[in-house]
Image (cartoon, rainbow, N blue to C red):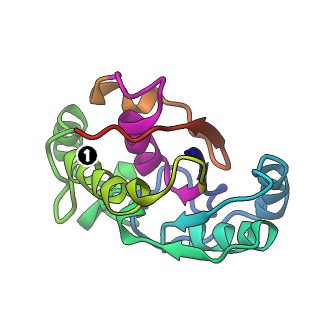
């Protein structure tokens, strides 16, 4: 199966704002970034999956017109939930607690939020509930967030699936990034 991962474009929030599952607007550069993404789309696809958050939804709807497929919105593709920290700047968080979380982000949840392990489990659920049902010759487009896309890469990308989770942030996923690769489902 051919997989195309697309990260949403730049967001219109101040730098340093925590916005995992917070619905935030896109930056004014959206039209230009969309055109760059459009030039990298496959000529056809079987399915478009997207996070339901508006920054992904808007992009998925735009590219769905090009690919002639309606997006399927899947909550499992939402970004990591930062709970009580959503909408705040990193500087206004209790610094000792933020440092503790930063040292233990893989297993420690933010207050009222989730841990990376929770996000990883959600992305694994997406793979088993959605990707495994496709045939090997399908092309699938996934529009989501950096955290989810990196987690998917650790599980299905030929180059990254052998990487340890602690290296997840080394996987390049800038705003508007498009990553394509072939994946063959292997039963556990």
Which image quadrant for residue 87? bottom left
Q: Position of residue 98 (x, y in %)?
A: 23, 44
Closer-to-camera residue (73/185): 185
Image quarter hosting the C terminus: top left
Magenta region includes residue 128: no
Magenta region includes residue 149: yes
Residue at position x 61%, y 51% in the image: 6
Q: How many marks?
A: 1
Q: Is residue 28 left or right of residue 60?
A: right
Closer-to-camera residue (81/15): 81
Residue at position x 57%, y 62% in the image: 13
Q: Position of residue 173 (x, y in %)?
A: 56, 39
* Residue extent of the magenta highlight: 141-163
Closer-to-camera residue (99/32): 32
Closer-to-camera residue (121/9): 121
Residue beneath label 1, please?
116
Please tell me whether residue 56 is drawn above or below residue 167 in the rendered image: below
Image quarter hosting the N terminus: top right
Q: Which element is circle 1 on?
A: helix
Q: Is residue 108 left or right of residue 48?
A: left
Which image quadrant for residue 128? bottom left
Q: Position of residue 59 (x, y in %)?
A: 67, 67
Q: Callout 1: few (<14), some (14-19), or many (20+) C-alpha neighbours within 10 Å?
A: many
Q: Position of residue 33 (x, y in %)?
A: 78, 54
Residue at position x 39%, y 54% in the image: 132
Please tell me whether residue 124 is drawn above or below residue 30 in the rendered image: above
Which image quadrant for residue 25? bottom right
């Amino acid at each position: 199966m051919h997989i195309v991962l697309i990260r949403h474009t730049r967001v219109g929030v101040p730098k340093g704002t925590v916005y995992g599952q917070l619905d935030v607007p896109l930056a004014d550069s959206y039209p230009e970034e969309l055109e760059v993404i459009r030039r990298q789309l496959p000529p056809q696809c079987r399915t478009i999956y997207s996070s339901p958050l508006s920054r992904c939804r808007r992009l998925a709807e735009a590219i769905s017109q090009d690919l002639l497929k309606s997006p399927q919105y899947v909550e499992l593709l939402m970004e990591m939930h930062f709970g009580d920290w959503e909408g705040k700047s990193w500087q206004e968080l209790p610094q000792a607690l933020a440092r503790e979380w930063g040292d233990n982000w893989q297993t420690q949840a933010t207050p009222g939020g989730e841990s990376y392990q929770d996000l990883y489990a959600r992305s694994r659920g997406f793979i088993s509930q959605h990707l495994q049902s496709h045939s090997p010759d399908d092309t699938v487009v996934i529009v989501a967030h950096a955290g989810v896309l990196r987690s998917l890469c650790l599980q299905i990308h030929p180059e990254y699936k052998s990487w340890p989770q602690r290296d997840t942030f080394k996987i390049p996923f800038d705003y508007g990034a498009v990553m394509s690769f072939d994946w063959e489902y292997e039963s556990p």
